[in-house]
Image (cartoon, rainbow, N blue to C red):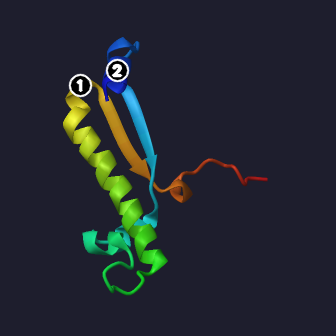
Amino acid sequence: MPALLAAARSSHDHIARVVATSSSSAEMATLDYASLLGPVHGRSAVDPGLLYAQSKLGVAISASELARRYGEHGVISISLHPGGVSTGLFAT
């Protein structure tokens, strides 16, 4: 964190940007901390799709929290679903 704050202070616009790649599957998840432990203590295996969605929700929450905590110090933090970005990459 010190390096990110220093980058914000020293940049020409006094802003440091953090872009985290999430997924639209984050919208289908809820945080279930017990499921993150996996098949331990006699629990059955957890669906990999659920774990993926939870991990992407965690990415989005982390980006939001970073912006909340450090926004006033020049840190802009966002998360995005890369499929939703119109880049023209596949344009012919």
Question: Is label 1 in a helix, a strand or a loop?
Answer: helix
Residue 32, visible in the rendered structure: no
Q: Secondary structure at mark 2?
A: helix
Please state which amino acid type lies under the numbered disc 2: Ala
Residue 44's place in the image compared with 32, above or below, is: below
Can the viewer see residue 10? yes
Q: Is residue 66 left or right of residue 50?
A: left
Numbered tag placed on residue 73 in the rendering = 1
Circles 1 and 2: CB distance less than 8 Å? yes
* Labels in figure, total: 2
Residue occupying image coordinates x 31% and y 49% = 62
Which is more toward the observer, 49 or 46?
Answer: 46
Quarter of image, res 44: bottom left
In the displayed structure image, the side of residue 42 where residue 73 appears, left or right: left
- Residue 84, image x, y percentages: 51, 57
Cα distance in 3D space between marks 1 and 2? 8 Å
